[in-house]
Amino acid sequence: MVKSPLVNRIILAVSAIVLTSIVSMSATLAISKSIEGSATAINAAGALRMGANQMLTRLSVLPTRPDASQNAKLFNAYENQLSGRAITSLIPAGSEHPLTQQHRLIIKLWKTNLLPMMEAHPQGSQITAQMIAEVNRFTEEVNKLVLLLEERTEARIDLLHLIQITSLVFSVLIVIALFLDLKNRVLRPLRKLVRVASAVGDQDFTQQANLKGSDELAQLGQAFDQMTSELALTYQELEDRAREKTEELEVSHTALQVMHATSRNLFANHDLCSGSIPMLQELEKLLRIGPIKLYLHDKETDEPVEAVTTASQKRPFYCRDHHCNACLVTPEAFDDLPAQDNDGRRLLLPIRIPGQILGTLEVWYPAGKNLPATTRRLLETLTDQLATAIFLEKQITEEQQQTLVEERTVIARELHDSLAQSLSYLKMQVTRLRRLNITGEHKAAHDDILHEFSTGLNSAYRQLRELLATFRLKLDTPDLATALNKTIDEFSERLGKRVEFEYTLPPQTLSPNEEIHSLQIVREGLANAVKHANATEISVHITFESPEVRAFIRDNGKGLPDDNQPINHYGLIIMADRARTLGGDLKVQNRATGGVEVSLTFIPKSRSLIPSQTSYA
């Protein structure tokens, strides 16, 4: 954690005082420990002098009970005292130290001179002058050792006094410096700050602390100075904020009016693109956002399907009115719009009704601008309106499809109960005429007329059956793609080999009526390839090249005779009628590689032709 300058100075001063105390106490403890036992060592060394003289006196006295080993014990005790812990504990380990050298000299004199003379001297005989001289010499060396021990102890004590005095002086200096620093950096700035605070309390914003530095009080003084400067601008800022809020409310009010006015058109014409693009573009101008895209969710596709966009370089595939250029923009203008690669941010809003998500609204806006809360609420209101419109459009489409199926069912039932019964009756009458035995010159003419009548009646009956199949045909599957997949599976089983299938139509491209006719044409083409062409390979390709839908059924069968349609092949005639109903073109022709190709091309009635390849608003 980073400390502030003022705290750092206080911590530094306190740390210096604490460190000085610790150093002083540590040095005192170390020196006290080092001189511990000095008095004992001095006393022990002094006792050596007395011990030497005592042994010399003892040798000159005649013992009452002679005992040679008693002197030996006395000599060993003296030698142990000479090398005892009381003295050696203060002798340094280094061989060059004077104490070490003096102690070794004393031991050497004892072992080499004094001890041999005392051991050789007879007990009770007179002490020689040489022994006295050696004892005196030994005593002088012991005195030197005692003097060295005393000097060493006094030096340690003097050092201890010096450390204590130095620590005291250093502590006093630190306290004085800390007091002066607090006076200059704390007390004086506090007086200025109190003066400025009193002035602010009196609504006088001209006072300034003018504190320099980087510590807390300097920063506080700078904050006071900044506060007094900003307080003068407070009322102006409040007015600016009030004006901004007023502008936001006006924008929100205008946006709500736009959505309210456009919602009528959106629900009236049941066209999501033409009904929503003007509103979305107006909202983009008001809210300064965009482009906006609308995606619909289809349970039969994994990816969302684009349904509306407010800015595009080329005409979208779902465009229904190819004379409309509302969403087309120039490449230069498109490159300036916010995008993932152009400093843009994206907001995704779900379009939902209770229990179901219908789509997603994708809103782009500049990355350096945050969307206000009012803008988000307006966009959420927009998603509610779009959800209602999409749900109603789906309901209307389903109702139209159901109505169409019911009408076709009624027509099929009426045809079956009226015209089909009449044709069946006529077929029975023709059968009766065939059984009549007519002879004479009119037999040939009678047979020709009867044959033509029978052929025409069979043709009419077959066409009626095709009409009944058409009227009764309905999509039991959710979409054309699923229905075609089931058809492909059916004819693959009949062929004994998989039928190649390609389908690239976007969802909701065709109306229910167009889906039924397209499905029936594909079924008829597959039936012809399986029943009449004796094909072993069949392929079906249904593609979308805006605005056209193209369907191809190809086989490798025996082909058409002389590149013409077979005589009385009413299936092909009905396929052509269906193509004309779709407003398209049907071609049935032999392929260069063998077999037949059935091609269907038409533009859905909800789309119009593109007048030119490229056009911009």
Image (spheres, rainbow, N blue to C red):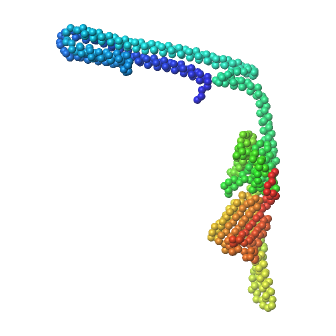
Please give the name of the residue rendered at 76% of the width and 44% of the height, measured from the top-left corner: 289
Please give the name of the residue rendered at 28% of the width and 15% of the height, measured from the top-left corner: 110
Q: Which of 169 and 565 lies nearest the eye of the viewer?
A: 169
- Which quarter of the figure has residue 149? top left
Residue 492 percent location from the top left of the image: 64, 68
Q: Quadrant of the N terminus?
A: top right
Q: Is residue 232 left or right of residue 15?
A: right
Residue at the extreme bottom? 440
Q: Which of 439 and 608 lies nearest the eye of the viewer?
A: 608
Viewer can see residue 165: yes
Residue 206 percent location from the top left of the image: 75, 21
Residue at the extreme left? 65
Q: Is residue 446 left or right of residue 212?
A: right
Please give the name of the residue rendered at 75% of the width and 69% of the height, measured from the top-left corner: 587
In this picture, is 488 found above or below 288?
A: below
Q: Is residue 120 left or right of residue 192?
A: left
Please give the name of the residue rendered at 76% of the width and 51% of the height, measured from the top-left corner: 312
Residue 419 percent location from the top left of the image: 78, 74
Q: Which of 296 and 393 lies nearest the eye of the viewer?
A: 296
In this picture, is 597 found above or below 291?
A: below
- Which quarter of the figure has residue 506? bottom right
In this picture, is 575 found above or below 172?
A: below
Report the label total.
0
Q: Which of 596 and 95 lies nearest the eye of the viewer?
A: 95
Viewer can see residue 387: no
Residue 174 percent location from the top left of the image: 56, 17
- Which quarter of the figure has residue 179? top right
